[in-house]
Image (cartoon, rainbow, N blue to C red):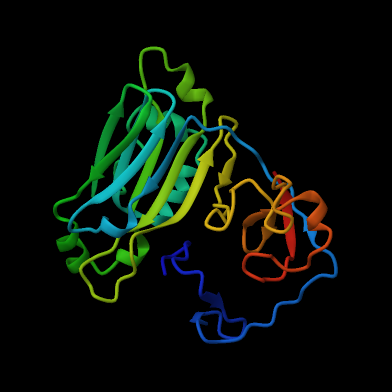
Amino acid sequence: IYVQGRLHHNMIRDKKTGQDRYVANERINITIPQSAQNIPVDRIDSSYTINIEENRSTLKDGVYIRLHTDIHCQLRAFWFVNIQRFYKELDSRDFRLSLYDNRFLKDNCVHQETFNFETSGDYVQRIEFSDAENYLINNNETRREYPLVLIVHSLITENSEEFFQLPIQVATLHVKSSIPTDPPTKFILRISKLADGRSLVLQDIFTPGAFHSDNTCAVCLTEPVTHVLLPCKHACVCRNCFSLIDKCPVCQRFVTSYFQI
């Protein structure tokens, strides 16, 4: 668990003690509303997306980033970032200017790298900090630091109009160390910073593509998917079939809310 960021979904806050506790084998009673609520969702168009190759990304071997970009862009990597300072700078009015002037997290990380991608396409970029394992062993404040922060934005040039207009993708990561019990490399949080200063938290949705077409309803198998079910985030039912269910047809979890796509 990181300060201001949770690594595992199977940790919950205990109301009595105020502490996080492990609930892998514990039954949790969730109150289900009689009718699911429609949740408003912000929609954004991004010119770039990032993912990580979890299985082979470690502090020792480096982190493998998969980047898709439709424009020329820049990827910045910040190692061992102070969490409180990260959020303070992220929420600052001059967040974009600090990136533009190379001031962002300058004094609040251990190491940083910058990679330029001058043509559109799909890339795999290995990011490495050779002293990462030693830093982890010798530093007792690591849970107050994100091991890795990634930022993707339009490439800064003499004409930087795109940089100040397009969304900036920000991601915080846990990176697996050589400690046997350490969890695998995972995204902790992904944020899209919009030109108007708003921060939108990005969430994955899941499609049952192993069983049928990704965009076809899992109930009738004919109509296109129109609803994403919550809390499971399965995009799997059409408008007609949604009115007939109270559980997700994929995972059988009760539907408490939803949004339309």
Vertical placement of 32 versus 169: above or below? below
- Image quarter of the C terminus: top right
Residue 63: x %, y % from top left: 27, 51
In the image: residue 94, left or right of residue 116: right
Q: Position of residue 206 (x, y in %)?
A: 57, 55
**Which sits in the foreground, 87 or 7?**
7
Query: Residue 135: x, y in percent?
Result: 18, 61
- Tell me: residue 71, above or below residue 179: above
Side (left or right) of 101 relative to 91 = left
Which residue is pictured at 80% across the width and 58% down the height? 37
Write the residue at 69% across / 48% down.
225
The number of callouts visible is 0
Residue beneath the point at 37% across and 28% down: 121
In the rendered image, the vertical position of residue 72 relative to residue 89, given as above or below = above
Q: Quadrant of residue 28?
A: bottom right
Quadrant for the N terminus in the image: bottom left
Q: Nearer the viewer, residue 15 or 47?
A: 47
Whether residue 61 sits left or right of residue 42 in the image: it is left
**Figure check: 56 above or below 23:** above
Residue depicted at 30% across the width and 71% down the height: 182
Front-lying residue, 158 or 220: 220
